[in-house]
Image: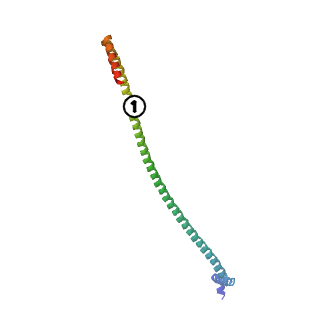
Amino acid sequence: MMSFFSDPSSWVLVAFILFVIIALVIKAPAMIANLLDGEIKKIKDELDNARKLKEEANSLLAQHERKIQNADEEAEKIISQAKEIAANQEAQSKIKAEEYVKRAEQQAIEKIERAEKLAVAKINDHIVSNSIELSEKIISENIDENSSKKLIQQSIQQISKLK
């Protein structure tokens, strides 16, 4: 048995057995199991928390996607309304421009007619004044005193017939 204790590996065996006995006496496996159970519980809690966070993130993502979709739809509505308003404004502008052109055209026609009437009146006045001048000239050159008296008598007779 002496040879057993002289071998160092024997002492390692004895130390191992003592270690196992002491560990069993102080309930090391239970402590290790409790320690491992605590770690397992901690990991499970972290996983549950991670799942909850993932669900919240997915929920927020879905909400934001709905908001983006709603915003896109509203933007399309606004663009559609803006295009419709622009088309209406364009149509109204065309109508107003046509009315303005018609009014301007009518005013131009009226102006031309007034100018035409004025020109005709001036020409008539000029013709009348020239006719009177010519008549006076012709009468003064061609009518003597006897003819003049005869014309006056004829004029008086015609005037009395008119009464």
Q: Nearer the viewer, residue 104 or 66?
A: 104
The C terminus sits in image quarter: top left
Residue 52 against residue 141 in the figure, above or below: below
Rendering coords of residue 23 (x, y %)? 67, 82
Q: Is residue 41 left or right of residue 63?
A: right
- For the residue marked with disc 1, what is the amino acid? Arg
Q: Nearer the viewer, residue 144 or 20?
A: 144
**Classed neighbour count for the residue bearing mark 1: other residues with Cα under 10 Å, few (<14), some (14–19), many (≥20):** few
Q: Which residue is mark 1?
A: 114
Rendering coords of residue 154 (x, y %)? 32, 18
Residue 114 against residue 154 in the figure, above or below: below
Q: Is residue 144 visible?
A: no
Rendering coords of residue 32 (x, y %)? 64, 79
Q: Nearer the viewer, residue 159 or 98?
A: 159
Q: Which residue appears farthest toward the top when viewing the image?
A: 145
Location of residue 19 by image quarter = bottom right
Residue located at (45% from left, 48% from top): 89
Residue located at (66% from left, 87% from top): 2
Residue 136 against residue 3 in the figure, above or below: above
Location of residue 46 by image quarter = bottom right
Residue located at (56% from left, 69% from top): 55
Q: Identify the secondary structure beneath mark 1.
A: helix
Q: Is residue 161 visible?
A: yes
Total marks in image = 1
The N terminus sits in image quarter: bottom right
